[in-house]
Image (cartoon, rainbow, N blue to C red):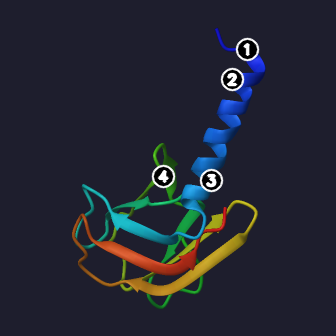
Amino acid sequence: MASSSSFLLAMAALAALFAVGFCGNTVTLTVGKGTTSTYTHLVLVANVPIHELAIREKGAAEFLDDMKESPAMTFTQDSKAPLKAPLSVRFSVKGGGYRNRDEIFPAGLKPGSVIKTDIKFEG
């Protein structure tokens, strides 16, 4: 039977591999299942662990409230009225502050579409 120190060492090694696997990756957002063409229901799935994802409509001065975060790096936004595209995004990276990308979501993206932010994840 493995000792507790061996177990802790193995867990630390797995955590390091997990972290290295994300480091240097470009943050991408995939339009998720259930997203409507007018973005009244928007689902975004990140490829790396980000937080506090928010969107801003074209011409708006402020970002909308943060999208609802659920497990597996998935974020949702519901709106009564269609959102005016192109949409901008803002998100935080643990220990790295906020990142913005203006007007990267054009109108009418379909589920499965991938948006590259050109932001490297260094988490």
Depth check: 89 or 26 in front? Answer: 26
Circle 3 SS class: helix
Residue type for callout 4: Met
Q: CA distance from mark 4 to mark 2?
A: 28 Å
For the residue pair 1 and 87, the one nearer the viewer reads as 1
Question: On the image, numbered disc 4 is attached to which residue?
Answer: 73
Specify which label sits upstream in the sequence, 2 or 3: 2
In this picture, residue 112 sits left or right of residue 14: left
**On the image, numbered disc 3 is attached to which residue?**
19
Q: CA distance from mark 2 to mark 3?
A: 18 Å
Per the rendering, the mark at residue 3 is: 1
Question: Which residue extends farthest top?
Answer: 1
On-image quarter of the N terminus: top right
In x, y percent, where is residue 89?
A: 51, 76
The residue closer to the viewer here, 103 or 47, is 47
Say whether marks 2 and 1 touch (CB < 8 Å): yes
Q: Residue 53, position in %: x, y?
A: 55, 64
Neighbor class of circle 2 (other Cα within 10 Å; few <14, some 14-19, many 20+) is few
Q: Secondary structure at mark 1?
A: loop
Give whichever of 32, 80 is nearer the camera: 32
* Residue identifier under label 2: 7
Residue for point 78% across, 22% down: 5
Q: Amino acid at mark 2?
A: Phe
Q: Position of residue 94 (x, y in %)?
A: 70, 60
Between the C-alphas of marks 4 and 1, the distance is 34 Å
